[in-house]
Amino acid sequence: MPAAVPIENGLQSSVIVSSSISIALVTVTVALRLLAKQKVRGWDAGDCCLIGALLANTALHTLVILLVVYGAFGFHITEIYTRFSPENAIFFFKGIMAFPILWTVVTCFSKISVLFMYTSVFVQESMARWARYIGAFLVTWNVATIIAGLTLCRPFARNWNRTIPGSCGSPSKLYTSIMVINMTIDVILLGLPLPYLFSLQMPLRRKIVASGMMTIGIGTWVITIYRQTLLSGLDFEDMTYTGVLATILSGLEPAVAIALACIPQMRPLCARKKQVSYGYGSSDNHERIDADSVVRLWSIDGVQSKRSKSDGVAADQEP
């Protein structure tokens, strides 16, 4: 471990503050979501995936803080070599190589958590089938992303020592492709439950509210798009200085996404009971659900379209 560097400029402080906030934000929101779920019906596989995202997010931002303390993140690369030591620069480039791997794990767990949530809410076979297809693609794509990141430079040690003979691919092209595919998956995930939701027999206002809750993750696109605009001006040879803002935004993106996914599901912590009925298709086939289910409907977690044993029941029809 190289010697720690002094914390003396605004870039260093901004990285430490943003990462600390990201850790605290995700920890608090996930804890409150799990508490709310425990109050209603207990945890499920989606919650376990979210715990995995929480752990990966904590590791991601702990790494970023260590890059500041031991990797001199926030200083120009030339200043690191002249003022500190080559070991600090090596520590940074080794750590920044691990950053996209942890980022990929966070986003993968969080998206799979959403798929589990959808299948618990809408139990039609078509939803389960789509969730399996998308989940398989997510895992495959994320594994491929990790492999691409690890093989960007050949030989491997060239990632942190550019004096070694060899070659490296374009990090900018890799990150751009990751962003495009990630946003495409987000669009699919946000649109997937809407046909099932609007086939419910329930007031239009409540459908709109529930749709808004399901698509709240669009808020992270602002961060994603702005971060992408920074890549064109990024000097990857001086990543220790020019990459500060892009790294902050990259870390905030999954943290905000997880928090936005958790916040609507905290409603059971302060909800009052109320008996209503919603269903699919004909009003004669409504499914009775209690207050907790109504709360979970608004929070995208709990109105389950249980299959009727009778043939032709609209609740079993796929949108």
Image (spheres, rainbow, N blue to C red):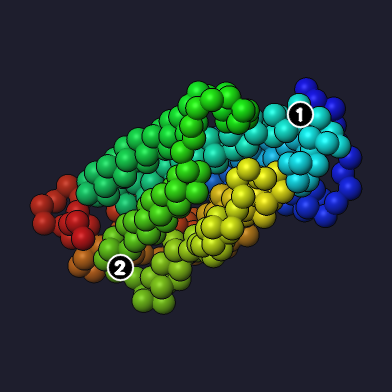
Q: Position of residue 146 (x, y in %)?
A: 46, 33
- Residue reaching furthest left? 311
Residue 318 visible to the viewer = yes
Q: Position of residue 140 (x, y in %)?
A: 35, 35
Out of 2 and 113, give the one closest to the viewer: 2
Instruction: Residue under label 1, please give it.
Output: 86
| Helix, strand or loop for disc 2 | helix
Amino acid beneath label 2 = Phe
| Helix, strand or loop for disc 1 | helix
Amino acid beneath label 1 = Pro
Residue 198: mark in rendering: 2
Q: Position of residue 120 (x, y in %)?
A: 37, 46
Q: Quadrant of the N terminus?
A: top right
Relative to 241, 167 lies left or right: left
Q: What residue is rendered at 83% in x and 55% in y?
A: 10
Q: What residue is rendered at 54% in x and 57% in y?
A: 232
Relative to 229, 115 lies left or right: left
Q: Position of residue 46 (x, y in %)?
A: 46, 41
Q: Quadrant of the C terminus?
A: bottom left
